[in-house]
Each structure stands twice: as structure tokens, then as C-alpha cells.
Image: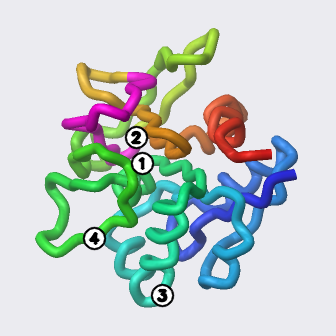
């Protein structure tokens, strides 16, 4: 059973913990570097990316997260988590930092403000049936590096990508009972 941490300083923590537990993972909240050390994989949830970055810096998690991901720890980033895993941001604060590791440029709030949130059926590479995708103030990917695979697109922009053991979505796969995106992530975690 893989030990999967969920970055728990801000965001959709409870929903991811529930999804991962349903799939048989040993899922737990990560708020301190000691908790990060026991992770076989990490989920960075949706939330508010500038708040996440500032809290990760305040709680001394930013550098340990960077080091673990650089060393090959699998990670799933959803919505704000995609921004946190991205190497580059458009539309962020001038000094906004990320954990990085994913060779993409993302645009914060690309689909618009909260009132522009939407749901759609989305075809995802590797899945037989579409995923019900919920976009809330979501980013999209503007550029991908050569090693990044686009798994899904919406409105002509990538919204799900994978690079090695990093998986990221613009949407929130944790909000309904469909666990296939979480399963794709768990398949990246060495057993």
C-alpha cells in the first residue's frame, strides 16, 4: 500500500484523502517536512496557488518538496496544484514561486473568474470513457516541454499533462466519485 501525502496547508485536502483511501492508499495530510519524508507520492490539491506557495515557504515545505520531486517522487497536482508543479507561470504574482518539476507554462485563472467555472465531459488519454471535469478558476497549459505528454485538452488548451512521474490537471478530479485520475497517479508510484 503506497504512502501518499496530500499537501494540507490549503486546498481540497479532505476530498483527495478520501479518494486515495478508497483506492487503498495509505493517505495522510502533509504539513511538515517530517510528514513529507514518509511519502511515496504527493498530491498538491486545488486551492489558491499564491497562498499555497506562501504557506509552503512559511512552514519550510517548499524546498523539501522541490528536492523530493527533483529526486523522482511522483506527484499529482490538481488546479492550483498544477500551478505549484509548473516550472513557469503566466498571470501570477511577480515573485510567485512554485515547486516546479513539470516543464510547462501555465496561465493562472485562464478560464476566467469564479463565475466562469464550468463542467464538461473530457476525453483523457488512457481512459476508455470521458471524465466529468469540474473547472473552478482553473489554469490551462500554454506551453509544454518536449517530454510532456498532453492527456486532455479543453478549448484548445492542454488541461491534463504527464511528464515522467508527474501528473497534473486543470480540473478537480476529487469532487465526484470517479477515481480514474487518482488511479492513473497511483500507477506512477513504484510499488
Magenta residues (range): 136-152
* Residue position for label 4: 97
Q: Quadrant of residue 165?
A: top right
In this view, the mark in front (1 or 4): 4
Is tag 3's residue or tag 2's residue first in the polypeptide sequence?
Answer: 3
* Residue position for label 2: 170
Report how far apart the C-alphas of labels 1 and 4 lie in the structure. 16 Å
Q: Secondary structure at mark 1?
A: loop
Crowding at dot 1, Cα within 10 Å, few <14 / some 14-19 / many 20+, comes out as: many
Q: Secondary structure at mark 2?
A: loop
Report how far apart the C-alphas of labels 3 and 1 lie in the structure. 22 Å
Is tag 1's residue or tag 4's residue first in the polypeptide sequence?
Answer: 1
Q: Is residue 141 magenta?
A: yes
Q: Is residue 94 left or right of residue 178?
A: left
Is tag 3's residue or tag 1's residue first in the polypeptide sequence?
Answer: 3
Report how far apart the C-alphas of labels 4 and 2 lie in the structure. 18 Å
Q: Position of residue 138 (x, y in %)?
A: 34, 44
* Residue position for label 3: 60
Kindly check if marks 3 and 1 are in contact, taking CB atoms under 8 A apart as contact.
no
* Residue position for label 1: 79
Is tag 4's residue or tag 3's residue first in the polypeptide sequence?
Answer: 3
- Identify the residue shown where x is 71% and y is 59%: 40
Crowding at dot 3, Cα within 10 Å, few <14 / some 14-19 / many 20+, comes out as: some
Crowding at dot 2, Cα within 10 Å, few <14 / some 14-19 / many 20+, comes out as: many
Kindly check if marks 3 and 2 are in contact, taking CB atoms under 8 A apart as contact.
no
Q: Is residue 6 magenta?
A: no
Amino acid at each position: 500500500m503506497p504512502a501518499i501525502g496530500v499537501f494540507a496547508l490549503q486546498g481540497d485536502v479532505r476530498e483527495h484523502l478520501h479518494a486515495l483511501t478508497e483506492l487503498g492508499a495509505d493517505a495522510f495530510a502533509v504539513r511538515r517536512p517530517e510528514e513529507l519524508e514518509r511519502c511515496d507520492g504527493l498530491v498538491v490539491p486545488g486551492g489558491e496557488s499564491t497562498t499555497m506557495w506562501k504557506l509552503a515557504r512559511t512552514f519550510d515545505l517548499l524546498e523539501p518538496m522541490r528536492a523530493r520531486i527533483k529526486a523522482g517522487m511522483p506527484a499529482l497536482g490538481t488546479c492550483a496544484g498544477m500551478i505549484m508543479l509548473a516550472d513557469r507561470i503566466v498571470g501570477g504574482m511577480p515573485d510567485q514561486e512554485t515547486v516546479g518539476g513539470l516543464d510547462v507554462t501555465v496561465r493562472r485563472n485562464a478560464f476566467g473568474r469564479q463565475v466562469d467555472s464550468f463542467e464538461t465531459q473530457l476525453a483523457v488519454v488512457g481512459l476508455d470513457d470521458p471524465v466529468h471535469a469540474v473547472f473552478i478558476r482553473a489554469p490551462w497549459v500554454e506551453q509544454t516541454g518536449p517530454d510532456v505528454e498532453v492527456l486532455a485538452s479543453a478549448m484548445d488548451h492542454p488541461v491534463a499533462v504527464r511528464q515522467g512521474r508527474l501528473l497534473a490537471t486543470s480540473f478537480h478530479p476529487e469532487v465526484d466519485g470517479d477515481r480514474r485520475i487518482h488511479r492513473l497517479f497511483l500507477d506512477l508510484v513504484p510499488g
